Amino acid sequence: MIVLKFGGSSVGTPERVLSALDIIVAARAIDNARAVVCSAFGGATDQLLQTAALAAQGGDAYKEELNAFIQRHRDALTALFPINRRAEHEQHIEHECADLAGMLNGVSLIRELSPRTQDFIVSFGERLSCYIVAAALRERDLAADFCDARRLVRTDNTFSNAKVDFDQTNRNIREYFDTHTNLQVVTGFIAATENDETTTLGRGGSDYTVSIFGAALGASEIQIWTDVDGVLTADPRKVPRAFPVDQLTYEEAMELAHFGAKVIYPPTMAPAMDAQIPLRIKNTFRPEVAGTVVGREREAHTYHASGISSIDKVTLLQLSGAGMIAAAGIAGRLFAALAAAKVNVILISQGSSEHSICVAVAPADAEPAERAINEAFTLEIHRKQVNPAQVEPNKSVIALVGEQMRLVPGIAARIFRTLAHAKVNVVAIAQGSSERNVSFVVDHDALPRALRTLHDSFFFPQERRVHLFLLGHGLVGGALAKQLQERRKNQKNNIHIVVCGLANSKVMTFSEEGFDLEGLDQALAASREPSDLAGFLQNVSDMPVPHKILVDNTATDATAPLYLQALDAGISVVTPNKKANTRDMAFYDQLHYKSRRNGAGFFYETNVGAGLPVIGPLRDLIEAGDRVQRIVGMMSGTLSYLFHTFNGDKPFSALVREAREAGYTEPDPREDLNGMDVARKLVILAREAGYRLALEDVTVESLIPAALREVAEVDAFMNALPDFDREWAQRLEEARIEDKVLRYIASYSNGQARVALEAVGADHPFYATSGSDNMFCFYTNFYPNTPLTIRGPGAGAEVTAAGVLGDIMKAGRLN
Ligand SMILES: NC(=O)C1=CN([C@@H]2O[C@H](COP(=O)(O)OP(=O)(O)OC[C@H]3O[C@@H](n4cnc5c(N)ncnc54)[C@H](O)[C@@H]3O)[C@@H](O)[C@H]2O)C=CC1
Ligand SMILES: N[C@@H](CC=O)C(=O)O
């Protein structure tokens, strides 16, 4: 036998009442339901309270609200009953409402609303809703009676929050149900004193009623039907990935409820808990979902935690001072003072040094709490033995709750490691020895990020969600977008990539849930938000998602300062853009220091050799104790392509166009032709090898004809380039005469750095290379004679994007 309860949201409209009726009919047939407790129609209690408050001001202003209340119940009759069977119910409603109107008239005349009168007025909400539900069940041929709980639930006369007389109430309920075998539709929330004065049961009143009836009748289950799928792992408004928990113990449910999970109000569980009756929370609008069962025990589940809840805003108060150490009675005086000021303490934390005690209170209690503490310790403060109460507003409390956290080592470590990675500062910590609840205080601003990170860590431990913010959507950016789509189809590891931000030089756009990877181009095209680097980073910082990576696929130098800010905020940076790494040494040092200090990744493998692994192997060598003596390389895909293909068949200028079309060149191909792109790569490699080389230290041979160096526009430059084809043909011929080929070579040794075009013969290692090949030779202590050599295609959007994706994976695993 079971008992059920439908809250206001489940009987908010006639359509919802119909869904509830279906559930009740099935529960009667299948589970032998004996009692159904209903709340007032959604919002009706508030409407009555408002009406009563208006009436107490005198005059007729309350009548509009009253009429709306009455009309709502008339409308329900119209929707639920055929016209020929409505009259009896209409009469009942009109009769009840006449009583209500009379009472409100009295309040208006005497302009006084006592708690007792208020309880009587709000009782009409449940009295009318339950009457209608019972009649509608009979309309479906189910033998159901309206049951006014005031006949059975006896309380004291603490109006609006009455205390139940369980002996009398249980006796009444059992006797009544012995003689009433029909299904009883019981008014929630309302009760009566022994003198038949109407009372109400306070917050969560209808849950309390069903718990009382379930316990009195010895039900096998108490079902609470509401508008959510059960108790969720977290508040879904703050954690979109929250999902319903199958089972909770009473204690877990209470811990979660205390910290904000509003589905059950703990005191209402007491009768069910005492009688050890399981409570099942179900969704009226999705009855097929199993819901959450709250009981004495629960089966072990795969997660260590059962839920995460939080209190949005609290204020911390700290009492500290050397005079507190080893002084007995300090805590007693502190809490006595707070109790006397009627301050409810939400969380307490004291370190074993006894130097300070910290309490969290509701913001409204902060001022009285501060005053109470300072008054209680006036003398000690005067003698400078303790400091005046230190108040820290704008904090939030988070609680991770779970029966299975008990006796499991590493839970606290995981919590705080996760928070550290998300750059969440923990201000205070409290854990009771039950180990069922670890609570801690964070800055209010960090709350959404902290909740989501923790939720992912404890409820999606097998998966890492990495949030990307993509700056630049050109050749490399576009190829990366396609590779992200492909990767999702063939995903092999546990890193789940979510793209939350996108920008090119014109517009930017953001999505907290993540863009559809197939629709990145369209998302950007649809955006009207002008692009702006500072605004982009602000959005990245503000978005409350964990594991963020800024990916810079632009070629601009203007993004470099952003890296510093991102790394400071614990956001990893991945980039093929060489500009930041080739700024002055002081900037370079800061960049790398911030990455190390903040544990945020800075990955730039594609700065050199595009998708080829060059920086990684070089770093491994150095970490193994090797020392680079000399670097020689062909480091430009563009220049390799030009000189590998330039054989006299096509003019040099046509090959430059081909390299550009193949996506080998920089957005401005003059960056390749003037040698600066190669110079940057050499600087990056030398710095990686531990040498403090600046861009200005590199001797650079530019391949741009002197006459074209002042040309402003790329197109004008490209159009003028054919004028110099004859000079290039001549240079090629000169090399050929000596049986040599042209190669653009970078070299570094003994502090000397040079990039230049050279003619090399058949004995040179770069003689027989081809296509866009890059070749890097590292002469080191471990490889003194035959250099460690890395060779392969060194440019192209596809290979570069693949390298960027590889770096994203590394950053994703890291943070
Ligand atoms: N193409 C290749 O083979 C390789 C390229 N790289 C590097 O990859 C980077 C990207 O190259 P491409 O894709 O070829 O360039 P691209 O010119 O095709 O794309 C650059 C993108 O950045 C955007 N952008 C420019 N300034 C911006 C700003 N201030 N804010 C937001 N967006 C901005 C542009 O609108 C465009 O979407 C460059 O740094 C390049 O050196 C590195 C290795 C190889
Ligand atoms: N333009 C560059 C691209 C890679 O950095 C090149 O040609 O190598």
Image (spheres, rainbow, N blue to C red):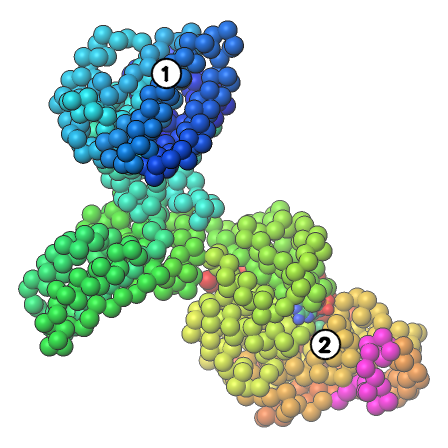
Which of the 4 quarters of the picture holds residue 792?
A: bottom right
Left or right: where does residue 403 sit relative to residue 584? left
Q: State yes or no: residue 702 in magenta.
A: yes
Q: State yes or no: residue 494 in magenta.
A: no
Kind of residue at badge 2 = Ser
Residue 86 in sight? yes
Element under disc 1: helix
As drawn, 594 above or below 289: below
As drawn, 109 above or below 684: above
**Range of magenta residues:** 701-718
In x, y percent, where is residue 569?
Answer: 46, 68
Which of the 4 quarters of the picture holds residue 297?
A: top left
Residue at position x 52%, y 75% in the image? 564
Dot 1 crowding, Cα within 10 Å, few <14, some 14–19, many 20+: few
Mark 1 vs ligand 1: CB below 8 Å:
no
Q: Earlier in the sequence, mark 1 or mark 2?
A: 1
In x, y percent, where is residue 430?
Answer: 24, 56
Say which residue label 1 marks.
Answer: 95
Say which residue label 2 marks.
Answer: 636
Residue 280 in sight? no
Q: Which quadrant is the N terminus positioned in? A: top left
In x, y percent, where is residue 411?
Answer: 30, 53
Mark 2 vs ligand 2: CB below 8 Å:
yes
Q: Quadrant of ligand 1?
A: bottom right
- The foreground one among 492 and 413 is 413
- The foreground one among 723 and 383 is 383
